Image: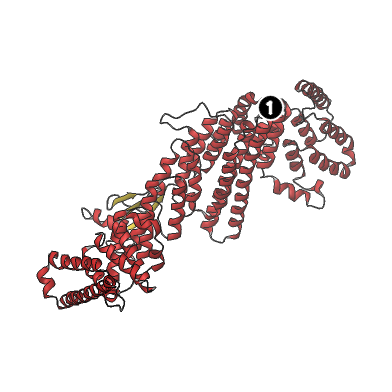
Amino acid sequence: LVPGADPSARQLCFAWGPAEVLVCETLFGRAGAGTAARALTGSVAGAGEGAPNSSRVFVVRKDQDIYIQTLRKLFNESHGIFMGLQRSEEELAGKSRKAQLVQVSKNYRSVIRACMEDMHQAAVSTRDPALQGQYSTQVSILSAMELIWNLCEILFVEAAAAGPLLLRLLDWVRLHVCDVDSMVREVLSSESPSKHKLFWNVVDVFVLQGRMDEARHLLSKEATANPTSMNMYKILDDLMKKMPVPSLGNTQTLTELELKWQHWHEECQRYLQDGTFASNPHMESICKILLGDEDAILEKKELMTTWYHFLVTRLLYSHPTVKPLELRFYAQSSMDLFLGGESSPEPLDMILMAAFEFEMHQVIKECSIVLSNWWFVAHLTDLLDHCKLLQSHNLYFGSNMREFLLLEYASGLFSHHSLWQLGVDYFDHCPEYGRVYLELHIERIPLSTEQKALKVLRICEQRQMHEQVRSICKIMAMKALRNNRLGSALSWSIRAKDAAFATLISDRFLKDYCERGCFSDLDLIDNLGPSMLLSDRLTFLGKYREFHRLYGEKRFPEAARLLLTLMTAHIAPCSFWMTLLTDALPLLEQKEVIFSAEQTYELMRCLEDLTAGNPDKQKFQDDDVETTKVEMLRLALARNLARVIVKEGTVEGS
């Protein structure tokens, strides 16, 4: 796991994450655990390898493919196809539904192929040997994925019947066995193709793949170049032209096809026995292939390259009306004949064999083991589930196979800094455990920016995930508070509906006001609206700011009433009473009487309660500034009361 680790000299420590594990090796004995812990948190991660007490930290990811940039297209575009399949509520019946599912399958394959071509271009353009090797490996993996998917599409999704089945398998081989394409291009681009040393190899390839028109075209060049072989060419050309093949349009029955094929087969046999092609070994070999002679076909083993190419060629010339359920017998014998005990089957061979045996669950199991990520099995299983082919297979621990694989795939996506957004939709379409998984994973998303936090929050709010909404808001509020961004912190705490935290931040606002003499984030405080009712302290903050606004607009009577209400309603913190009373001073000193006698008595009572009920009364009395404030307030209140009594007495007398 750790390159160059020596278990006898070092110990390993590790810490699990949601989708990865940090592994640290250290030289220390008992002290090693603490050092490793520091290394895992990054404090010694930068230590050089040559240092005597160095520690190295390795990140072991469970789904490394998620981080390959060139595979982003695969994940992003297949997500759109997946979502389209889930949204197709109208379950079309019969042929229409099957055509829709086949098209979805082809869309998935086109994404795999596009990604493979991009990867191939990247491998060609890079000069880094390590990167080139990585890209080439990915091209091979994507090629195998498309090969398997295409076969599953033919056998399971389209469920091709006898006749059309062979045509689909021929297309499958032609598309995926591309090793001979360069040879074909080389021969066809030469000045005299018939004299090229690989000419007959190319003709054989066309015949082995059932590409009769191309094979006949090349043979015509041979006939032109060698007039002596004209008669043989015409007979062989006629045989190839008349070869019966299944049709996709159901224009003939299987019985009619079998009768035509039998007559054609007997004609080929007659020409071979008559020695018509005896003077030309190449044409004789082609005639034997047309007769389905296994030895003759196996002689071209190097041109076919794979046992499944041999299987399809064998079926084409010996059993063109093969039924789907008969494939398993031909597939097994073809693999045995082709490999001939010289080599053992590769994992890809076993997957294809499982598909030919119609063992869907075995295909999915083998792919899960062999392939490097969950993308393939998750999307293929989902498609097969929509084809109603996996309904009977439930897992022992509750969820069905489709949901289990989608959960695994989406969990991997959540370890990526941006692909996690795709994972949300996959979880949404897992009816049993999807929401639980989403709740657990979304809490682990690093909220590195406010924009990202808002994105996560919107996802949670759309799904009524109230607990996660509160958690995210609290985290962001705490971050903002640590950075002394009080407005942002208050906004997040209101969104979280956290009364205790809103009270704490309101106290910080009031403390800042006492120190600086003005409020920050006025726009937020001015527009609290009903949110201010979340806590008494927040209500006080909003109303106190409203008092300042009324005072600034010279609406003194309203400001005075609000100030008195704040004191008598007991929602203001006791520590803030002196500030409120001090704010009353300018109103008491106005030329026009603002406070009535009753209001003045209330202010006097508040002042006496403050001075008499203060636990630090002695300290309060020793503070010259506070004493001066109290004296000024008492004088202003007495003067205001006298003015009020005179004014009210004058009004009553008149």
- Residue 460 to residue 105: above or below: below
- Taking the spot 27% from the left edge, 70% from the top edge, the residue there is 652
- Taking the spot 80% from the left edge, 30% from the top edge, the residue there is 243
Query: Do we see residue 401 in this rendering?
Result: yes
In depth, the one of 527 and 416 nearer the eye is 527
Place residue 236 in its image quadrant: top right
In depth, the one of 304 and 242 nearer the eye is 242
Would you say 183 lies left or right of 222 here? Answer: left
| Residue placed under numbered mark 1 in the picture | 161
- Taking the spot 63% from the left edge, 31% from the top edge, the residue there is 155
- Residue 154 to residue 417: above or below: above
Residue farthest to the front?
654
- Amino acid type at circle 1 is Ala
Would you say 642 lies left or right of 242 here? Answer: left
Residue farthest to the left?
618
Residue 172, x across and y down, in percent: 67, 38
Residue 635, x across and y down, in percent: 19, 77
Would you say 398 lies left or right of 303 here? Answer: left
Query: Do we see residue 295 in this rendering?
Result: no
